[in-house]
Amino acid sequence: MYQQNKGDNKLKAKKLTLLLTLMVLLATVLSGCGGAAGGEPDTIKLGVIGPLTGDYSMYGTAVANAAQLAADEINAAGGIDGKQVEIIAYDSKGDKTEAVNAYNRLRDQDKIVALIGGTFSGTTLSIKEIAKADNMPVLTPTATNGEVTLDAANIFRACYTDPYQGSTAAVFAAEELKATKAAVLYNIEDPYSEGLAVAFDEQFSTIGTVTNYEGYTKNDADFRAILTKIAAEEPDVLFLPDYIAKVGVILSQVEELGLNVVAIGGDGWDGIEGDYAEVAEGHYFANHYAKTDESAIVQDFISAYEAKFESSPNALAALAYDSTFIMKSAIEAAGSTEAEAIITALAATDMSGVTGHVTFDENGDPIKSISIIQVVSGEHVLAAKVSGK
């Protein structure tokens, strides 16, 4: 009987040792995956939402690439308070529902601490109320619609707004191009295009005459009739606020019809020289930075981006790069990844980046001058730096 009990005790001891070993191994695995139960994660996750496929993928890809480039540089320098930054990018496909799904996944599955995005105004507006309810720190690099940051203390932007951009384009047309008559042609289904059109119309109407205020839909492809109507009024400039895919088609038809009018666009034109250099020749667009800027921070960014991605960075890339560093600075200043602390630190931002010096107003919008670019021989030439009125 004694021998049997002694054997049972040895077996129990072996089982206990095995159980303790398994518990230690499990704790080690959990720690390596981002922290044991109750522990702090060893990475700081930032979400990115943008169109990574489809006609507008060049914009979302530029944002995701630049955010990753910034994260790589931050991590190489030691991360944020010793923690590595992880960029998690999802494809919105330029669709509002897809953007909401992406945001929910980033919040619930990936446990991001802040969002760099969305890329487009429409998709950013689609997640605005959800992000407000979550008190998620949001810094959109490129959503320019005026409504994005209004009544949302947790939402900021690195780009100037549509109203500011549109009014500045009107000032440039009148003061620099000496235009007295202007026509407006815009996409009635896109908040970005409409926001710029409204602001340009309002500002230019105080300076000169708006001869035409015309709209089209996203599926329109033949603009000859409407362009002929505009030409009959002999405007000095044509304000054309939309993205490359649509602008390229319209400018091609402007040239085909032989219309003698100078076109002006918004930052959605950035990169137009890639596929439409010939028809964009001599025309102007507002932008966030000039690639010909000789400052070290601009040229270092361009060199690093080109080396990593074998392509030239557009303005959206520059804004996303700046946004990632702004978010880094805010998290460091907050001393934690707690949402309210990050939001408070974001509001106090005061730093320089590729696209200029950044501080935020009471709405979370930056105040900065706008670069007006002219396309000359397929290159960007800085025509002026203008402030809105």
Image (cartoon, helix red, strand yellow):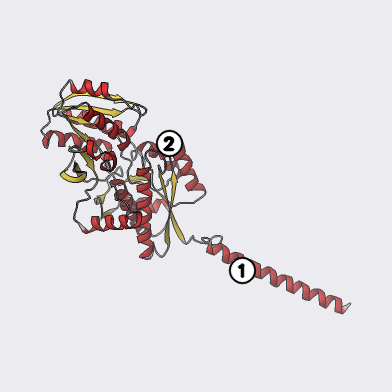
In this picture, residue 297 sits left or right of residue 30: left
State the image coordinates of residue 358 (x, y, percent, origin top left): 26, 51
- Can residue 94 be seen here? The reply is yes
Using the image as rendered, state which of residue 149 and residue 29 is in the foreground. 29
Q: Name the residue under label 1.
A: 24
Q: Name the secondary structure under disc 1.
A: helix
The one of 187 and 154 positioned closer to us in this rendering: 187
Residue drawn at the location 32% of the way across and 58% of the way down: 307
Tell me which amino acid carries mark 2: Asp
Of residue 288 and residue 111, the one placed in the foreground of this image is 288
Which quadrant: the C terminus? top left
Q: Along the horizontal axis of the image, is 112 left or right of 180?
A: right
Q: How far apart are marks 1 and 2 (CA)?
A: 46 Å
Image side of residue 191 versus residue 34, left or right: left
Element carrying mark 2: loop
Residue 369 sits in which quadrant?
Answer: top left
Residue 314 % position (x, y): 29, 47
Q: Which residue corresponds to the image point at 17% horizontal and 29% vertical from the top-left?
A: 261
Residue 145 in sight in this render: no
Label 1 crowding class (10 Å Cα cut-off): few <14, some 14-19, many 20+?
A: few
The total of numbered circles placed on residues is 2
For the residue marked with disc 1, what is the amino acid?
Answer: Val
Residue 7's place in the image compared with 242, above or below, is: below
Pair 1/2: label in front: 2
Residue with the most extreme right position: 1
